[in-house]
Image: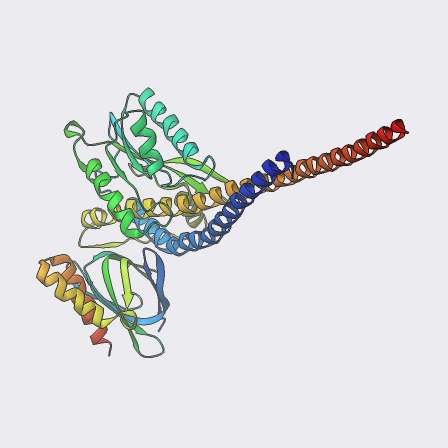
Amino acid sequence: MGAQIRVYKRRIKSVTATKKITKAMEMIAASRIVKAQRQVAASSPYAEELTRAVTAVATGSNTKHPLTTEAENPTRAAVLLVTSDRGLAGGYSSNAIKAADRLTERLRAEGKDVDSYLIGRKAVAYYGFRERQVTDSWTGFSDSPSYADAKAVAAPLIEAVLKETAEGGVDELHIVFTEFVSMMTQTPVDRRLLPLSLDEEAASGLEQRITKGEILPLYEFEPSAEGVLDALLPRYVESRIYNALLQAAASEHAARRRAMKSATDNAEDLIKSLTRLANAARQADITQEISEIVGGASALADASAGSD
Amino acid sequence: MADLHVELVAADRSVWSGEATMVIARTTSGDIGIMPGHEPLLGVLQSGPVTIRVSDGGTVVAAVHGGFISFSDDKLSILAEIAELADEIDVARAERALERSKSEADAGAERRAEVRLAAATGAR
């Protein structure tokens, strides 16, 4: 066998092995998307009820709360960035990081200092390499977040919001994550969690109810409106962060599935063209051998004809 | 009399929903019983058992940790970070958790384990 064919054969073998791996990763990611989507769906009743309750308190009472009132002159904002722990997911993490960079720039232009809170090893590595300051970071749960994870993330953020700005607290809380639109589309988005701006969704729902002639009930608060808000708002932030984490996890799996699918397709193309090259090399070898034999035979024939 | 529509939801799933004649829960200022026609209410719940008297007889007991109760138009929702129905609770595991939290002097975990046990044994 010619040296050329041996090289091609070796490359085909290695590409086939890679293809098997990417194919397996694609399938794993595909099955995890379904699981992640189910989790998003399972968490939505809680989020909806909570949003309703927050809307009810916010509209049904005139209570002022540090988590709902806008600072007159906001000088510091916290940005929570959600990325993945592992790579091989195409542009998933870098797109989220880019969105966070854009938001940070915008906030800086508005004269606010930005505190960065990071989730996922990719963001931590990116910020670490550029020696940017990170206030807090979490890793290890990006592909299947639990409510306890969301709580752990929310706790220092809420604490920072409640602190006075002069003592290192923040006036605003933003979150950057990748929204799961569909299997094919995931877009990085930034949302302001605090101070509370009633969700567009909730607001439009409210309007609908008002136009339908249904009035919002006047709630009795137990123990008091302040007490309820105090307990409700941290839960609301937690639930929003939880929802963002779940959506980000679904997006991560979808992005990984797509990246692995194109890697598999690429490997297939590569195998096809390498096989063609190997076949051509084999044909060339055979052709050469034949011409050598024919050449040798005719040389022998010439020699014996000459001796006569 | 009209019945209550009850939704018991935890942070990561919907635990129970259905019609009921009365719901008893523990708010921060004491136990509260809600029947159809109660005035709209929004309350903070303590860790404790929630008892639901189901319309077609029988009761559902759940252990609820850190949550809210909201009631309007005969619709009652109980939101909780963690909510478990009595028959989902593993008594042996809750007892172990109670022992562990006692030895570690973790008041919050101890309370949670007690509530879980109370809900599980009260229902039987």
The foreground one among B27 and A128 is A128
A284 in relation to B5, above or below: above
The foreground one among A286 and B25 is A286
Task: Name the side, left or right, on which B96 lies relative to A23.
Answer: left
Task: Name the side, left or right, on which B103 lies relative to A114.
Answer: left
Which quadrant, please, contains the N terminus of chain B?
bottom left
Q: Position of residue A147 (x, y in %)?
A: 30, 52
Q: Position of residue A64 (x, y in %)?
A: 21, 39
Q: Residue furthest front?
A: A308
Q: What residue is shown at x 31% (from left), y 66% (from top)?
A: B37
User: Is residue A218 at least partly visible in the picture?
Assistant: yes
A160 in relation to A54, above or below: above
Which quadrant, please, contains the C terminus of chain B?
bottom left
Total number of numbered labels? 0
Q: What residue is shown at x 24% (from left), y 46% (from top)?
A: A152
Q: Position of residue A3 (x, y in %)?
A: 61, 34
The image's colouring method is rainbow
Name which quarter of the figure residue A129 lies in: top left
Q: What residue is shown at x 19% (from left), y 32% (from top)?
A: A169
User: Is residue A74 at least partly visible in the picture?
Assistant: no
